[in-house]
Image (cartoon, rainbow, N blue to C red):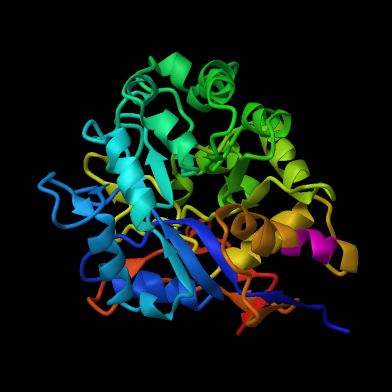
Amino acid sequence: MTTEIILPKWYDLHVHVRQGKDMGDYIQAQIDMGCAGILAMPNTKPPVGKLTEDSDLPYWSIENYLSQIKNTGGDLFKDIIVPLYLTKDTTPEMIKEGTDSGLLRACKYYPPHGTTNSDHGRPLKTFVENGVLRALEDHAIILCVHGEKHGLKGADYFDADTNAEKAFYLEEMPALAETYPNLKIVAEHITTKEAVDFVYQADDNVTASVTPQHLLYTVGSLLQGLKYHLYCLPLVKFEEDLTAIQQAITDPANNQFFAGTDSAPHTTKATPCGCAAGCFTGGCAPQLYAEGFEKAGCNLDDKDNQGRFRKFLCEIGPEFYGLNIPSETFSLIREASTCQPLKTKSGETVVPLPVGMERPELAWTLRI
């Protein structure tokens, strides 16, 4: 008998739906894979760095970006969270105002120049010194962390013995957690054993999101044949890191590691000035997560393992963010399917990660 896993519709708690003419296609790709809602990243141009449109700060507002998403197909979602991008202009007063209004539910820390459109980011110590992190703790606002140390030399940024994420979780995050013991933290798109260890050792106010690519691939997969569609930030790492992430999400006791795809569409991946960072997994993420579970030795024909998968994909993240788990469902069926490039209404093409890795065949079929 063919295995069918019936799951509640899930929340992708880290996704880029961008802006402009193709935004509706990216939102539809989320809906097509059973998403009940999203946490939409605020690294737009300009970034989502203020709360409402009546502020004169030179950024988009949460109010405005939420409206854009809803007016471009996102009105079908049950819930949408847009974090506030932490900039030089973020103040404790903004955190209180956003909390009181109900508009602010999370904030996003980007290391300066650490990834796509992170030029407005500031060093973490900025938000210690100006009281913003204390305000987040006081008002129970979630801090979403891009966990890489900034400003490193090449050998420190990525080397056999160290890298930007490893340094961040060994040197900066322990002090942050100690200083703000009640701060709710999501260690986003973790890639290293050190990040896994940090989350394991923390209290239950610290969680982590995991992407499909960091569950399936290593840096060798990226470099062998230069599979640039796997280029994302943070970079995929080594086998021991992959193993640590796989063990964390398939642990029967897991209540801290959950799904957040970091799906990032680029119509042009390789550019004259370098490779755009981000893997697009819209439309195929649950299938890839299922593949990752089984690659970790967790056979999804087994009912107990299906329960672990359900927790990871559908329950842990929503519970941390205070989201209702939907009654509506979708199914994963153990039948082969094929992943196709996304053709947008404007005529652009976005290549999903499996197609870019020259293995568009999927072991699972998704049905809604």
- Residue 361 relative to residue 358: left or right: right
Residue at 66% across / 64% down in the picture? 314
Q: In the figure, 60 relative to 242: above or below? A: below
- Where in the figure is residue 347, as x and y percent of width and height? 24, 76
- Residue 291 covered by magenta stretch: no
* Foreground of the two, 19 or 187: 187
- In magenta, the rendered stretch is 305-310
- Where in the figure is residue 256, as x and y percent of width and height? 69, 45
For the N terminus, give its image quadrant.
bottom right
* Foreground of the two, 176 or 333: 176
Q: Is residue 251 visible?
A: yes
Residue at 45% across / 75% down in the picture? 77
Residue 177 position by quadrant: top right
Residue at 22% across / 39% down in the picture? 273
Q: In the figure, 302 relative to 83: above or below? A: below
Q: How many marks?
A: 0
Q: Is residue 234 visible?
A: no
- Where in the figure is residue 295, as x and y percent of width and height? 76, 53
* Foreground of the two, 264 or 143: 143
- Residue 222 relative to residue 199: left or right: left
- Residue 232 relative to residue 295: left or right: left
- Residue 307 covered by magenta stretch: yes
For the C terminus, give its image quadrant.
bottom right
- Where in the figure is residue 144, as x and y percent of width and height? 47, 42
Q: Main secondary structure of the magenta part?
A: helix
